[in-house]
Image (tube, rainbow, N blue to C red):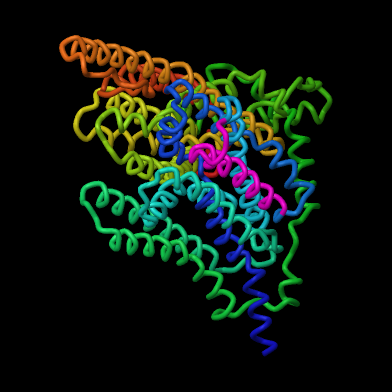
Amino acid sequence: MGKSEGRLGQFFNNRWLVFVAAMWVQSVAGVGYLFGSLSPVIKISLGYNQRQIARLGVAKDLGDSVGFLAGSLSEILPLWATLFIGALKNFIGYGWVWLIVTRRSPALPLWGMCILIFIGTNGETYFNTAALVSCVQNFPKSRGPVVGILKGFAGLSGAILTQIFAMMHTPDHAALIFMVAVGPSMVAIGLMFIVRPVRGHRQVRASDKSSFMFIYSVCVLLAAYLMGVMLVEDLVDLSHSVTVVFTVMLLFLLVIPLIVPILLSFHFDIVSPMEEFLLPEPSKEETSTSGESVNQQEVILSEVEDEKPKEVDLLPALERQKRIAQLQAKLFQAAADGAVRVKKRRGPHRGEDFTLMQALIKADFWLIFISLLLGSGSGLTVIDNLGQMSQSLGYEEAHIFVSMISIWNFLGRVGGGYFSEIIVRDHAYPRPVAMAVAQIGMAIGHFLFAMAWPGTMHIGTLLIGLGYGAHWAIVPAAASELFGLKNFGALYNFLTVANPAGSLIFSGLIASSIYDYEAEKQAHMHQNSVSSLWTLLPGTSLLADEPLKCEGAICFFLSSLIMSGLCIVAVVLSLILVHRTKIVYANLYGRTRT
């Protein structure tokens, strides 16, 4: 009995159980990606035009990106409290929206609806914070795989929630808002005492690599399964029982990763508490010593950058490293002999630790920010307006494309991090080149949306989803390489502002204005035709006022072309960044290859 209780305790405190629970939290945390499915019912119920829906979309993006409060609370409150606050905000925000849409509560003005959407979506920043903080602490030497998988599940959550909603088989589309209000909140509250730090650095095992590969395999299988199910549901009229079977299989795939902590806790031998206690803590002395040695060399290394001739950068890699090493040795010797006084730098160089204020005066930081704004901002505009885009082209079920772009977003995050790592590790080439490739794909995707040829909705969704997701795997890594990890939280949170800023420009100002202009033109034409009919048939009455609705490829033709052109501008900015940082990446990764 005592042994079984001990096994249960080990299972409850296993870091892989925490990781799987965090994956489940993330699988319902991306409620913002469902806005394309929620916006049509909100628009019809409240009589909004496209410009007003775009403002709600900007409020959603702000709620999804402003996570400063969640990060601050996670440092002073236990993580279960962070999850509980997020669940409460999600429930209040979207629950109130559901009451208004279903006429159970008086309607609020547009600014009030924006506040509710902001509060509801901001709850997911608490989910993300709790999941990431707990798992990064439990897997301190595997932060890359952990963050990539968790962020990927957040991107995949739109497709997961959509499939679960399809199983409900209800004609009431407002029920999706109710599910968004209740479902994520229930999952977060149910798991809030599991998602926590459990001294995971003491649970390092030789099997960790194979465990990660198993989790990765499940992730790819899950994405492929969801894509297959969505395509089948789009092409074939399935019965409700078949949809239920598909959803049960989806839930089974989500549960499969639980095999890892079960096997580690109940099947394989677990390190005893005494042996676990003997596992070494991260060495603070080593860290501080290496930090001091690095600080002692920083001034000399920066002098090398200042003193080397410009033509050195044009030499082949081996010759360039040889010349730099010679100059470095001379400067070290001269400094040691007192023959030269090394000047004190005014600020850090690229690759060192920057504060946010120091980064804000660097051209490289703004190249990243503006390129991210143009790339991810245009992608987010498509995500937010996908419901109207598909309806304008005659597709009745917008949720199919919302789910598909969620899947591609997931694969873009996983693939963007994986392939950009190959670029820097194997070739010592700047990581932003992967961002340029993603933006080229997005430019093509926007162009296909503008042309509206048969099948382009599917291909455009693929390209935009992959490109948008890749941005959020590539940009954080590139920012950490160029501006350091010491103040990475502040740097990353500033970069995330590019998302709502891009959405405000592309969706709030460009796409919505053009959509409403075309919708008004079509409404006037329709009204004129009805008026002429009324003159011929006096008994015919004019149609009642209805929300403006645009039909045809013209609705998003110009806005898609504009976004395609600005993605090309983003490509140019990314390539300028690549050119400016070649030496930095050669110094960071070139030595590891030799």
Could you tell whether 152 is left or right of 408 in the image? right
Q: Residue farthest to the bottom?
A: 1
**Residue 577 seen by the camera:** no
Residue 92 is a magenta residue: yes
Residue in front for this viewpoint, 551 or 101? 101
Residue 259, percent across and down? 49, 71
Prevailing secondary structure class for the magenta stretch in the rendered image:
helix
- Part of the protein shown in magenta: 81-107
Residue in the image at 74% along x and 41% along y: 72
Q: Residue farthest to the right?
A: 338
Could you tell whether 212 is left or right of 111 in the image? left
Residue in front for this viewpoint, 179 or 454? 179
Q: Quadrant of the N terminus?
A: bottom right
Residue in the image at 45% along x and 67% along y: 256
Residue 508, percent across and down? 48, 20
Q: Toward which corner of the image does residue 59 lie, by quadrant?
A: top right
Residue in the image at 57% along x and 38% along y: 105
Q: Residue farthest to the left?
A: 536
Q: Say if 77 sits above or below 280 in the image.
A: above
Residue in front for this viewpoint, 576 or 35? 35
Could you tell whether 463 is left or right of 149 in the image? left
Q: Toward which corner of the image does residue 498 lie, by quadrant?
A: top right
Residue 261, percent across and down? 56, 70
**Residue 5 seen by the camera:** yes
Q: Say if 245 sits above or below 590 in the image.
A: below
